[in-house]
Amino acid sequence: MEGLLPEVRQQIEERHIKTEILSPNSTCNYVLTYDAQWSWDWFWTFSVYLSMAEFSVTKDNHQIGMASYRANLGPSAIGRTKNKIRPLLIELLRK
């Protein structure tokens, strides 16, 4: 979903870490990559929700941290994406 990347960047920058979107040929000492999956809730709210997210931080091409989120089935899966990823990024960036 298009709002995920701006939200990730905002939450990282709130911790006074500068972000930049890199091209495939760019280099940087620290790199955060992520994968996210969205699912459709046909039962509770008839809406799309974040069902999976994985974040990885590398330093000089070596993984130094990882955090993941998986939604449980049911109404608890529905909610604001930023509230789901905030605990992941807090824990990941604490390291």
Image (tube, helix red, strand yellow):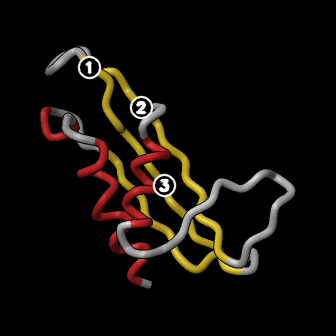
Question: Farthest residue toward the bottom?
Answer: 95
Residue at image x 67%, y 79%? 59
**In the rendered structure, which disc, 2 or 3, sits on the residue that comes first in sequence?**
2
Q: Is residue 58 above or below residue 69?
A: below
* Image position of 94 (left or right of 87): right
Q: Are marks 2 and 1 in contact (CB under 8 Å)?
A: no
Residue at image x 50%, y 69%? 66
Mark 2 nearby-residue class (10 Å; few <14, some 14–19, many ≥20): few
Residue 21 placement (x, y as % from top left): 65, 54
Q: Nearer the viewer, residue 16 or 69?
A: 16
Report how far apart the C-alphas of labels 2 and 1 lie in the structure.
10 Å
Residue 45 placement (x, y as % from top left): 16, 19
Q: Is residue 23 above or below residue 4?
A: below
Q: Quadrant of the C terminus?
A: bottom left
* Image position of 33 (left or right of 73): right
The residue that disc 3 covers is 54
Q: Secondary structure at mark 1?
A: strand
Amino acid type of disc 3?
A: Glu
The residue that disc 1 covers is 47
Residue at image x 78%, y 51%? 23
Q: Secondary structure at mark 3?
A: strand
Please identify the quarter of the rendering in which residue 11 is found. Answer: bottom left
Q: Nearer the viewer, residue 70 or 3?
A: 3
Q: Is residue 49 above or below residue 11?
A: above
The residue that disc 2 covers is 38
Residue at image x 43%, y 54%? 8
Report how far apart the C-alphas of labels 1 and 3 lie in the structure.
21 Å
**In the rendered structure, which disc, 2 or 1, sits on the residue that comes first in sequence?**
2
Amino acid type of disc 2?
A: Trp
Residue 27 placement (x, y as % from top left): 80, 68
**In the rendered structure, which disc, 1 or 3, sits on the residue that comes first in sequence?**
1
Report how far apart the C-alphas of labels 2 and 3 lie in the structure.
12 Å
